[in-house]
Structures are given as C-alpha cells and as structure tokens.
Image (cartoon, rainbow, N blue to C red):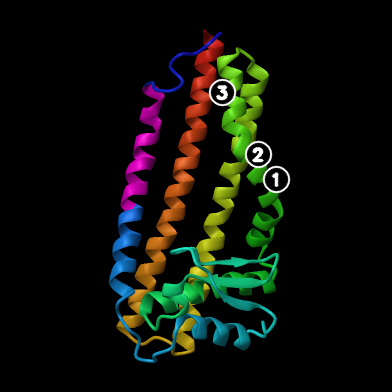
Amino acid sequence: MFYPGFLFDSTYLILIPAMIIAFWAQFKIDSAYKKYKTVRTLSGVTGSEVARNILDGAGLFDVKVERYSKHLGDHYDPSLRVIRLSPEVYDSATVAAAGIAAHECGHAIQHQTHYAPLALRTKIAPVVNIGSSISIYLFMIGIFLGNPLFAKIGIIFFSGAVIYQIITLPVEFNASTRALNILKTRTFLYGEELKGAQKVLDAAAMTYVAATLMAISQLIRLIAINNRYNDN
C-alpha cells in the first residue's frame, strides 16, 4: 500500500533535536575557525610545516603532505598515505591551521599504530558508501510500491551508515587528543594558542557528534515509517 505521508509527516519531529544540535555545532565550528584562522602563532610555522614535522618525528617519512583545493576539506587518506590540507591550513601560520594539521597527523599516527576503530572504519568504508547511497532509494521503493522486503533492506543498509558514524566518533576524538598532546609537547603552540587550537578541534568534534545523532534519528524515523506502513 502506498504511504502518502512519507515525504512530509509527523515523523519529521524525530529529527528536530538532532537538527538543532547540528545547527549549533556548525555555528561553533564556523565561529571558532573564523576567530583562530586570523590568530598567528608565535612560532610562525605553517600548517604544512607542522604536519611535516610531526610526521617525521613519528617516523612517517613516507606519508606525504599535499595542498588540497577544497575549503576545510582537510583529511588523511590511509589508502594512499597522504595528508591533504586546504590552502588556508597548508600555507597559514595560524592557531587554527596548526590544530587542524596536527589533527590529521593524529589520523596518520593512528594508522601507524593500528588503532582499532580507524582500521575498522577504513575496512567497512567501501561497503558502507555503496549501501548508504542506495538505502533511501530502496526504502522508498519498498514504501511506494508496497514491497516490505525492499523497505527492510533499505533500513539495513542505512544501519550500516549509522554504525560507520558511531565508529567515527572515537576515531576523531582520539585524533584530536593526540594532536593537542603533540602540539603541547613539541611547543608548536604556547599558552592561549593551545587553548585556541583545542576550541577549534572541540568544535569540529561536535560536528561529528551532530552527524551521528542525525543518522540515528533518521534511522529511527525510517523504522517508524516502516512500522506505520506495516500497520496499515
């Protein structure tokens, strides 16, 4: 039976708390990054120099540091063993740049030490990416065409994306902890600079928390819609 309330119905209320947290988290990261991307460090070391120094200190001479064109698209690619930093991080000697560069180095060090959550996330990523990209379509087909099997498969695939988000939390928090410890012990940052970097990284971590809550809320909504469909 076709369920006309799928596109807009009361189950959207399930998403509201997560949406509020997501807006708040985005505001926090925007404001923290905007502030500390203009605060130059006393050391005068750029983000790329911070990254190279940390990697070499950890014996990761084979991990490259590259400039990446996407704004705030900084990331570590474990498959190619490369850290990609956006221009405002790669070229800037600011508190925000140092914090972000160190965070990505934290991921490289996780990879080096076989940090279990990162290894698991990397392993399931290809399957999760495929499953999450088709999950909603399968669910909609199941609901609109009255096929409960497709709806259930869609929910199962989307559950994989939720699991991926949950695994991401310890990966990101651990990388930030590693980054702050390195920045402190290697004296890239001093006093208030270190506090500023922590604010940037804490705000960034909240965006992952918000994404996880949103994914969980969406999964609950899909289950609620499916249950309503089955009751009808």
Q: Which residue is at a point 36% across and 41% down the rendered structure image? A: 19
- Tell me whether circle 2 and circle 3 mark residues in contact (CB < 8 Å): no
Magenta: main secondary structure: helix
Q: In which quarter of the image is the N terminus?
A: top right
Q: What element carries label 2?
A: helix
Which residue appears at 63% of the width and 41% of the height? Answer: 160
Q: Mark 3 points at which residue?
A: 140
In reply to whether residue 11 is colored magenta, the answer given is yes
Residue 215 higher or lower than 151, as above or below: below
Q: Quadrant of residue 203?
A: bottom left
> Which residue corresponds to the image point at 52% horizontal and 27% vertical from the top-left?
222
Left or right of 204, for residue 66: right
Type of residue at label 2? Gly
42 lies left or right of 148: left
- The location of residue 111, given as percent across then percent down, is 67, 69
Residue stretch in magenta:
10-24
Residue underneath mark 1: 127
The answer to the question of whether label 3 and label 1 lie on touching residues, with beta carbons closer than 8 A, is no
First of labels 3, 1 by sequence position: 1
The amino acid type, in three-letter code, at marker 3 is Met
Residue, disc 2: 131
Is disc 3 surrounded by few (<14), some (14 to 19) or many (20+) residues within 10 Å? many
* Residue 156, placed above or below residue 192: above
